[in-house]
Amino acid sequence: MTLYFQERGKLPIGNRLNKILGTVFLLASGAYYTAERIGTKIAAAIPAAGAAARGSYDATLSNPTFFENFFVWFFMLVGFVLLTFGFPKDKDG
């Protein structure tokens, strides 16, 4: 006896779970990118604070670009794909 999803050629994961996982992956991507930018600002501020008493210091930030970190765009891609599969088209229309 075969299962329903094997007969119909569907995956055993539901639409609701796809939507939830897609949202989690997109939020994780945004949170990771935000945390990376905050860490960059803190890392640039520490030497600038120490050098402020001694004279001038070039505290130019080098913020990471969006596609510089593998996990940011990978999580976004996986989240977008899961959300896309979470909203299937109607079979009648």
Image (tube, grey):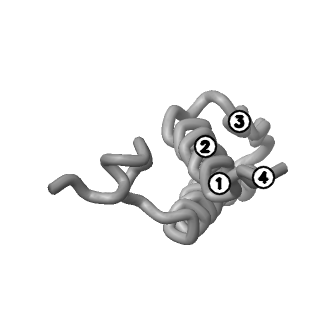
Nearer to me, 80 or 49: 80
Pointer 2 or 4: first along the chain: 2
Q: Residue 66 appears in which quarter of the rendering?
A: top right
In-image side of 73 versus 61 (left or right): left
Looking at this view, name the residue that lies furthest to the left. 1
Examine the rendering and report whether any part of residue 31 can be seen: no
Q: Are marks 2 and 1 in contact (CB under 8 Å)?
A: yes
The Cα atoms of the two marked residues, 2 and 4, are separated by: 23 Å
Q: Which residue is mark 4?
A: 92
The local secondary structure at tag 2 comes to: helix
The Cα atoms of the two marked residues, 3 and 2, are separated by: 18 Å
In-image side of 31 versus 93 (left or right): left
Q: Which residue is mark 1?
A: 83
For image coordinates 72% across by 58% down, the residue present is 53
For the N terminus, the quadrant is: bottom left
Q: Is residue 35 above or below residue 61?
A: below
In-image side of 81 versus 13 (left or right): right
The local secondary structure at tag 3 comes to: loop
The Cα atoms of the two marked residues, 3 and 4, are separated by: 40 Å
Q: Which residue is mark 3?
A: 66
Q: Which mark is residue 30?
A: none
> Could you say where residue 21 lies in the image, as x and y percent from the top left?
52, 63
Pointer 1 or 3: first along the chain: 3
